[in-house]
Image: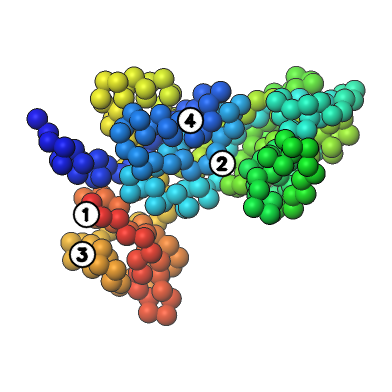
């Protein structure tokens, strides 16, 4: 039998990633709450909101791994989006009030030509019904109260847009973009460009950072694993959350030095940031090269 104190130690030692295939109908916060209850670990958080209408890859960090959030959240995203032409709504999706309608006399070639205009670094205005804050208030709260929401454009990167299916008035597109991109706004702006209007009717995130749907466990299966007590099988090591970063293997003495906040020597060609990994494969710290001394400076340290 494990006593309460040992249970507390075990829970605090758990650190890693759960990649959930979020179903339609739940908020991202709902899923985090399910994970907290199922794991009995309060320290958990997601790394990029998915609207209730959207499904797909939701990356949840658990335990000390939550300290990776700012870096994982900034990772690129990929979506499959269903866009309906000929109508606009005030929310830019199917939940909103219809604000205009127009005939759809668009060819597949015209649609693909319009897509190309949105590839690259572009400026995008977030939807009025979004969590962006205006003078300390969330935009959607202002919009619901009938207030005019003046949101400023933001620079985003759209790496690729590909038409997957053409079935007017609907089209399915693959969207590969930077973090912070609103696919609802992309659908709305695409409709404006085509002159017929458009809104988002379906969205599935297929990739978040290095994690894809292949890594994701359906929420139903995860709940079953919580009940059975074997959910650990789905826990991905914290070091994997930033596996696209360079890694530096640290020996025992270097691990001890880094965990005490001390620098360790870097190679002449090293630059930028990297993961400091122990010889056992554990994430020890996030490190950044000081170009003046050519040493690795610990930026975030993780204790096992």
The image quarter in which residue 183 lies: top right
Q: Which residue is mark 4?
A: 30
Q: Position of residue 179 (x, y in %)?
A: 58, 47
Count neighbours of disc 2 (C-alpha within 10 A) and say few if under 14, some if 14 to 19, many if 20 or more.
Answer: many
Outermost residue, bottom direction?
Answer: 292
Which residue is depicted at the point 25% across and 40% down? 11
Outermost residue, left direction?
Answer: 1
Q: CA distance from mark 1 to mark 4?
A: 37 Å
In this view, the mark in front (1 or 2):
2
Q: Which residue is mark 2?
A: 77
In this view, the mark in front (1 or 3):
3
The image quarter in which residue 254 lies: bottom left
Outermost residue, front direction?
Answer: 145
In this view, the mark in front (2 or 3):
3
Q: Which residue is mark 1?
A: 279
SS at circle 3: helix
Q: Nearer the viewer, residue 122 or 47?
A: 47
Q: Is residue 186 visible?
A: no
Which residue is depicted at the point 12% across and 36% down? 3
Of mark 2 and mark 4, the one earlier in the sequence is: 4
For residue 51, side relative to residue 41 (left or right):
right
In this view, the mark in front (1 or 4):
4
Of mark 1 and mark 3, the one earlier in the sequence is: 3
Of mark 1 and mark 4, the one earlier in the sequence is: 4
């Amino acid at each position: 039998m494990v006593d309460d104190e040992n249970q507390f130690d075990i829970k605090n030692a758990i650190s890693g990633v759960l990649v959930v295939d979020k179903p339609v109908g739940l908020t991202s916060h709902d899923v985090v709450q399910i994970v907290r209850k199922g794991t009995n670990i309060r320290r958990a958080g997601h790394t990029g909101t998915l609207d209730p209408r959207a499904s797909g890859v939701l990356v949840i960090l658990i335990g000390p791994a939550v300290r990776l959030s700012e870096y994982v959240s900034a990772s690129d995203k990929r979506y499959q989006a269903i866009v309906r032409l000929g109508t606009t709504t005030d929310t830019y999706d199917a939940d909103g009030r219809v604000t205009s309608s127009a005939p759809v006399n668009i060819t597949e070639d015209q649609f693909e030509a319009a897509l190309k205009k949105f590839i690259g670094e572009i400026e995008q205005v977030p939807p009025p019904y979004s969590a962006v804050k205006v003078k300390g208030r969330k935009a959607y709260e202002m919009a619901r109260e009938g207030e005019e929401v003046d949101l400023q454009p933001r620079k985003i990167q759209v790496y690729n847009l590909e038409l997957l299916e053409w079935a007017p008035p609907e089209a399915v597109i693959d969207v590969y973009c930077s973090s912070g991109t609103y696919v609802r706004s992309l659908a709305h702006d695409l409709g404006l460009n085509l002159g017929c209007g458009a809104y988002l009717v379906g969205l599935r995130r297929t990739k978040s950072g290095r994690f894809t749907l292949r890594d994701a466990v359906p929420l139903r299966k995860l709940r079953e694993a919580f009940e059975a007590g074997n959910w650990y099988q789905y826990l991905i090591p914290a070091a994997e959350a930033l596996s696209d970063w360079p890694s530096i293997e640290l020996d025992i003495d270097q691990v001890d030095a880094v965990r005490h906040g001390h620098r360790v020597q870097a190679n002449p060609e090293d630059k930028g940031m990297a993961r400091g990994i122990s010889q056992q494969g554990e994430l020890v710290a996030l490190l950044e090269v000081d170009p003046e001394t050519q040493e690795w400076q610990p930026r975030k340290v993780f204790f096992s």
